[in-house]
Amino acid sequence: MYTSDNFHPNLIAFPEHIALIPDGGRRWAQKKGCTYSEAYLYSMELILQFIDYALENGSKYYSVYF
């Protein structure tokens, strides 16, 4: 599940629109000995987990740039 030390629900509202720009997938794949396809699949799984979390907290719009 996504967590962030920078997000404080008692102080601010969760953003309505979130833009995600995944970066570092190829570097991660090289470090882990994975293929680029495996790295992108893993990135997509994490993005979907984050979107589920954001939906639960009131976000409505998402932009993902690859």
Image (cartoon, rainbow, N blue to C red):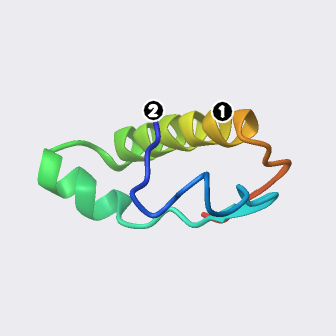
Horizontal relation, residue 62 to residue 38: left or right:
right
Front residue (pair 20, 38):
20
Query: Which numbered dot is residue 1?
Result: 2
Report helix, strand or loop for mark 1.
Answer: helix
Q: Type of residue at label 2?
A: Met
Quarter of the rendering containing residue 33: top left
Q: Residue at x 14, y 55 (%)?
A: 31
Q: Quadrant of the C terminus?
A: bottom right
> Mark 2 or mark 1: which comes first in sequence?
2
Query: Which numbered dot is residue 13?
Result: none
x and y, in percent, of residue 62 in the image: 77, 54
Quarter of the rendering containing residue 65: bottom right
Q: Badge 2 local density, few (<14 within 10 Å), some, or many (20+)?
A: few
Q: Residue at x 57, y 42 (%)?
A: 50
Front residue (pair 25, 63):
63
Horizontal relation, residue 3 to residue 16: left or right:
left
Horizontal relation, residue 23 to residue 7: left or right:
left
Q: Residue at x 53, y 57 (%)?
A: 8
Furthest residue toward front = 10
